[in-house]
């Protein structure tokens, strides 16, 4: 089993069809992509041994598609890196992975040449062109347990850890996605607007398996107006977007008069909380094109999911959940003693199945915490959730984000949901702050809707109509914007620093 077999099969069936596009321009057909991948894989194997780690540091570019496939074809391990990291942070990942080579975009190559201990090849350089010299090559033999991708956590809560994802993990992820979430074929397109170093890069595989187009925006990023324009041109468009991106896309749709894109097929959202009011607004704007996944780098894309059909019924409990356990995946909610909890009782979410990582790279302590010995193969996610009687999983929060005030647990997401139902609140993030009397108190960072000028007293009254008095914020901090990572996640660490100040 080698992930590059997905490309080989599609190239055999759809050799003349477009495989990779930059904006609206064709880069390579499937036949040409297979040829380029074979050349690069042969060049890599001539220089390095199977199992070596190869880093990719780049904003979204077509080359990422061929490089991931070539690294896997060569029997090596891909280490995609968030391009927005500081060169020192990139070095931390490259050093931890023991990467022997970094393939970098032209925008990053100069800084990385100076910062990294390994060889750096820019994607516009003669050295990169030399990787494409024709050479005989066949796909390396790998097993399901062969390491394929070191998926580094985003680092928003501390030092990045490399989740070890095997060929078997990623193949199981691909099959589960095609079984549960999307029906793809050669007349579909996958738009890579979210970072390909993480979330969007995983979606490359299901599209590759079905001979669909890989479309990289000309901007190399998520620009809502550009995204809508691409969906007017390419057939059967789908994308993975963070919830904050969905909100921006909806606002861009309003700005263009509410005209829906001609060929938008699917938006899969995940990677952060999608609030009930926002998904309802987005469904009204775009129609039933949405699906949701709940996963982690440690179990990529695949813990639970809500298919498009689940979004067609306006059931608040369903829309506020993260859906059903995925095909081939077991999900449970456990108490502190590791025992299953009854329906409706909050506890830590655990998952086991073929998509669960092999462990953290060179980090046995973190591996033992996430995959405890004797725990039956369960991955402890660190997330707090509730399973209801119908089998739907609803997230409460990360275990470390629960606010304990006066001995009572308060889940920030519940407070955020209440505040976001107020018309004067555009965005909100709720945290706990230390308090001498209560241990912790609830603080809400609020971005107000334009022209509303909402006041704390009005938000207090609004909360008291929806949640228990002890859960309402004790303090409101009004900000122009919430700090976010390149993946659209709110940087709670930056907000906590403001509390410290």
Image (tube, helix red, strand yellow):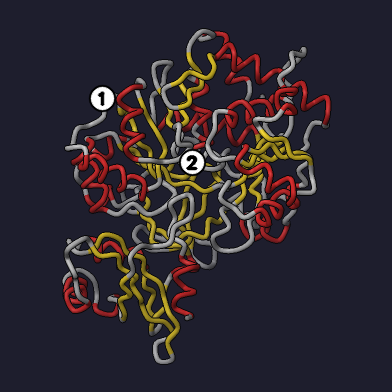
Secondary structure of residue under mark 2: strand
Q: Which of the numbered marks, if any, corresponds to residue 262? A: 1
Which image quadrant is residue 404 in?
bottom left
Which image quadrant is residue 226 in?
top left
Question: What is the x, y in percent for residue 208?
Answer: 52, 23
From this viewpoint, is residue 389 visible?
A: yes
Name the residue nearer the viewer: 328 or 211.
211
Name the residue nearer the viewer: 495 or 297.
495
Name the residue nearer the viewer: 381 or 392.
381
Q: Is residue 389 toward the left or the right of residue 129 in the image?
A: left
Question: What is the x, y in percent for residue 166?
Answer: 65, 37
Name the residue nearer the viewer: 125 or 372.
125
Secondary structure of residue under mark 1: loop
Question: What is the x, y in percent for residue 248?
Answer: 31, 47
Which residue is found at the position 63% from the left and 31% from the top? 68
Which residue is found at the position 42% from the left and 31% from the top? 191
| Residue matched to label 2 | 302
């Amino acid at each position: 089993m080698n992930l590059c077999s997905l490309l080989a099969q599609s190239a055999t069936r759809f050799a003349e069809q477009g495989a990779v596009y930059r904006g609206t321009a064709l880069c390579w057909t499937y036949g040409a992509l297979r040829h380029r991948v074979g050349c690069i894989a042969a060049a890599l194997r001539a220089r390095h041994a199977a199992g070596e780690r190869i880093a990719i540091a780049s904003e979204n570019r077509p080359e990422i598609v061929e490089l991931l496939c070539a690294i896997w074809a060569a029997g090596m391990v891909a280490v995609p890196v968030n391009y927005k990291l500081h060169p020192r942070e990139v070095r931390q990942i490259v050093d931890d992975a023991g990467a022997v080579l970094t393939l970098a975009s032209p925008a990053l190559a100069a800084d990385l040449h100076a910062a990294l201990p390994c060889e750096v090849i820019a994607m516009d350089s003669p050295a990169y062109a030399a990787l494409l010299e024709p050479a005989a090559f066949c796909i390396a033999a790998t097993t399901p347990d062969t390491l394929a991708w070191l998926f580094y956590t985003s680092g928003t809560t501390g030092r990045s850890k490399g989740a070890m994802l095997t060929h078997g993990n990623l193949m199981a992820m691909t099959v589960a996605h095609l079984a549960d979430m999307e029906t793809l074929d050669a007349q579909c397109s996958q738009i890579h607007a979210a970072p390909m170093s993480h979330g969007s890069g995983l979606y490359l595989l299901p599209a590759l398996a079905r001979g669909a187009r890989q479309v990289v925006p000309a901007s190399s990023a998520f620009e809502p107006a550009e995204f809508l324009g691409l969906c007017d041109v390419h057939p059967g468009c789908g994308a993975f977007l963070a919830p904050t991106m969905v909100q921006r896309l909806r606002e861009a749709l309003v700005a263009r008069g509410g005209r829906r894109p001609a060929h938008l097929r699917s938006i899969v959202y995940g990677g952060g909380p999608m609030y009930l009011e926002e998904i309802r607004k987005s469904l009204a704007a775009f129609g039933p094109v949405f699906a949701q996944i709940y996963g982690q780098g440690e179990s990529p894309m695949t813990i639970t999911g809500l298919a498009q059909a689940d979004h067609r019924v306006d059931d608040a409990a369903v829309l506020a959940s993260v859906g059903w356990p995925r095909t081939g995946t077991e999900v449970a909610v456990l108490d502190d003693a590791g025992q299953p909890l009854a329906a409706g009782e909050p506890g830590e979410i655990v998952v086991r199945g073929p998509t669960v990582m092999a462990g953290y790279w060179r980090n046995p302590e973190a591996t033992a915490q996430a995959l405890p010995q004797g725990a039956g193969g369960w991955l402890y996610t660190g997330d707090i959730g509730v399973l209801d009687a119908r089998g739907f999983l609803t997230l409460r929060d990360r275990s470390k984000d629960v606010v304990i005030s006066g001995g009572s647990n308060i889940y920030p997401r519940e407070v955020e949901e209440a505040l976001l139902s107020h018309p004067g609140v555009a965005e909100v993030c709720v945290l706990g702050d230390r308090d001498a009397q209560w241990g912790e108190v609830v603080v809400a960072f609020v971005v107000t809707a334009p022209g509303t000028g909402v006041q704390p007293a009005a938000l207090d009254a609004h909360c008291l109509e929806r949640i228990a008095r002890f859960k309402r914020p004790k303090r409101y901090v009004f900000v122009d914007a919430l700090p976010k990572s390149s993946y659209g996640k709110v940087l709670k660490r930056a907000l906590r620093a403001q509390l410290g100040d």
